[in-house]
Image (spheres, helix red, strand yellow):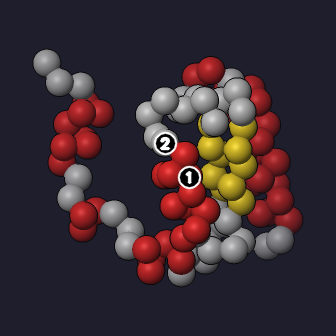
Amino acid sequence: GRSGMEDLLRSLTPRDLLTVEELEQLTVPIFVLWGEADRVLWPEHRRFFEAHLPPHAEVHRIEEYGHVPHMSHPDCLAARLLEFTRQVAATK
């Protein structure tokens, strides 16, 4: 049978996604960690986000990370997320 992820992806419609204009206008803190070894999403996907996220967005490219760093590098990922969270909290 199909996986839950496959069902989720099949159920998405364009109305479920942010438009380019909505991406550009986001004001919330944004942390993107992009695994350069990702075999699911391509570099052009990263370039799209780099071009359309607002200037305050943090995009980090990690050579050894793939698509699921929470599985392959959980401690390193947790440390990066904790650092970002602390930075955001310090500005409030």
Contact check, label 1 and label 2, Cβ < 8 Å = yes
The residue at the point 46 percent across, 40 percent down is 41
The residue at the point 65 percent across, 30 percent down is 65
Q: Residues within 10 Å of mark 1 (few under 14, many from 20)?
A: some
Q: Residues within 10 Å of mark 2 (few under 14, many from 20)?
A: few
The residue at the point 70 percent across, 27 percent down is 64
| Residue nearest the observer in this picture, 55 or 44 | 44
**Circle number at residue 56:** none
Mark 2 — residue? Answer: 42
Q: Amino acid at mark 2?
A: Trp
Residue 4 lies left or right of residue 45; in this view the side is left
| Residue nearest the observer in this picture, 20 or 8 | 20
Q: Amino acid at mark 1?
A: Arg
Is label 1 in a helix, a strand or a loop? Answer: helix
Q: Is residue 42 above or below residue 16?
A: above
- Where in the figure is residue 71, as x and y percent of width and height? 58, 22
Please, which residue is most extreme toward the front here? 44
Mark 1 — residue? Answer: 46
Residue 56 lies left or right of residue 10; in this view the side is right
Q: Is residue 12 above or below residue 69?
A: below
Q: Can residue 51 be seen by looking at this rendering?
A: yes
- Where in the figure is residue 55, as x and y percent of width and height? 69, 74
Q: Is residue 6 above or below residue 83?
A: above
